[in-house]
Image: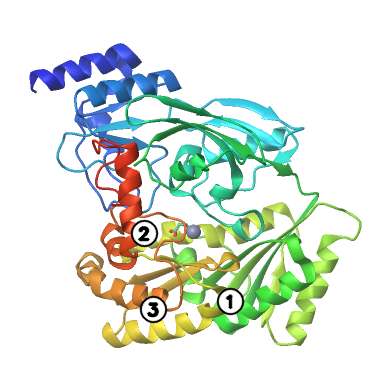
Amino acid sequence: MTQDAATLLERLRQIVGADHVLTTDADVAPYVVDCRDRYHGVARAVVRPASTDEVAAVVRACSDASAPIVPQGGNTGMCGAATPDRSGSEIVLSLARMHAIRAIDVANATMTVEAGVTLAAAQQAAREAGMLFPLSLASEGSCTIGGNLSTNAGGTAVLRYGNTRELVLGVEVVLADGRIVHGLRGLRKDNTGYDLKQLFIGSEGTLGIVTAAVLKLFSAPKARVTALTAVADVAHAVDLLHAMKDVLGDRLTGFELISGFALYLSRKHHPGSPDPLPGHPWYALLQFDDHSADVPLEDVVESALSNAAESELIADATIAQSQEQAGRLWSLRENISEAQRREGQNVKHDISLPISAIAQFTRDAEAAIVAAFPGARVVVFGHLGDGNLHYNVAAPEGVDARDFLENTPAINGIVHDRVVAAGGSISAEHGIGVLKRDELAHYKSPVELELMRRIKSALDPRGLLNPGKIL
Ligand code: MLT
Ligand code: ZN
């Protein structure tokens, strides 16, 4: 170890305590690989500050030593944004010890939480205050608010409540030079110039390190109904979405599309999963929430679904009769990602399209993929309600999954060319990280890329914050 490296580690120990500067291979191991096992990095150290002042002091120490920093929350990201590179020069800055709920203001319908609070803990704190924090995703037990902000996470309730960007009123951020932006304002109106917080949201730790945020809360729903429906194809699912919005309006809070094959994988890798509507090519999982208890929500949903059945929009449906049943229906959907991990690596896409373009896109893309890679298995699921699909391509049966990954550039081309041609985006909710950096360079317009680079160099002129991510 060089003199400089030893000095930096000593300084970091003085800031956070020796126990929170991890350097042994065993201690560092969980922080240097991503959850999909796609990126394996090397860290000079993992530092675990416990306060915003400590984060700021760590950043100053790293800046003085010209050491790049990789901020990390729950390490559940899909694009490698929280994994260090292989140089061994980067410091992983884990926000895990910053897990305080700083304040809940019920009258203002806001909650101030630190970056390392897990999403599930934030939801629970809101619930205990009689409120709802609506952000919801499969990894909510381990992903953190800091990571949610840094990727502008979406999930299953965006249709009704918007994605993370729309759920944040204020942020506290440590800048690349160690200064702190104290922006924890809980205001729904604030037109004092540029909306700086939105720069940090979705910037994947490349512009600053979010240490806390003011989040919007909502009234807790009084009734909740979950239904699984079987549909003939994606076009029918899109029509069903429209019909349900028409009848139930804002009470439709989630609309998830699941292909028959995605459901098969979910059940295959999670024995004991229910099989309520076997044998259909496509499914839509619907969630309804109601704030008034005047007309029983279940009656309205039942009548809307029976009308949908009469007009042949759906082939079959089941409505959960208890919270436990609803949880089991949701587990079919939420286990897909893990099932795919167990099945083997696949070429993953996180795309968004105008909802009106989705049916045509899925038809064209699948035909093109199967023509180019006979036997390739397309695993489609996602948040149809907000136009976001996880459009994943797995190896043909019997072909080694890792070998099949060599086709990633060609498969990306087939999928992303069609997405962009249809007015869509190559990253809906997972971000860019390393996984989609080259794709971003290819598809984003030169003028937008130049603006992004200028913003990066204005906020991080020495390129020490999460280098190599996004740009
Ligand atoms: C999901 O919707 O399940 C998540 O975005 C994770 C994934 O795409 O695998
Ligand atoms: Zn998703």
Res. 449 image quadrant = bottom left
**Which residue is found at the position 50% from the left and 40% from the top?**
197
Q: Which of marks 2 and 1 is nearer the N terminus?
A: 1
- Element class at badge 2: helix
- Element class at badge 3: helix
Q: Nearer the viewer, mark 2 or mark 1?
A: 2
Q: Is residue 398 visible?
A: no
Q: Which amino acid does label 1 sit on?
A: Pro
The residue to which callout 1 is attached is 278
- Along the viewing direction, whichever of 38 and 80 lies nearer the viewer: 80
Residue that protrudes farthest toward the front in the picture: 193
Q: Mark 3 and mark 2: span between their CA atoms? A: 20 Å
Percent of width and height locating residue 391:
42, 70
Percent of width and height locating residue 30:
30, 37
Q: Which amino acid does label 3 sit on?
A: Arg
**Which residue is found at the position 29% from the left and 57% from the top?**
435
- Element class at badge 1: loop
- Along the viewing direction, whichever of 375 and 108 lies nearer the viewer: 108
Q: Is residue 131 left or right of residue 32?
A: right
Callout 2 environment at 10 Å: few (<14), some (14 to 19), or many (20+)? few
* Colour mode of the rendering: rainbow
Percent of width and height locating residue 122:
59, 36
The residue to which callout 3 is attached is 418
Classify 31 as above or below 54: below
Q: Which of marks 3 and 2 is nearer the N terminus?
A: 3
Q: Mark 1 and mark 3: span between their CA atoms? A: 32 Å
Q: Which amino acid does label 2 sit on?
A: Glu
Q: Which of marks 1 and 3 is nearer the N terminus?
A: 1
- Residue 448's tag is 2
- Along the viewing direction, whichever of 249 and 293 lies nearer the viewer: 249
Percent of width and height locating residue 313:
68, 83
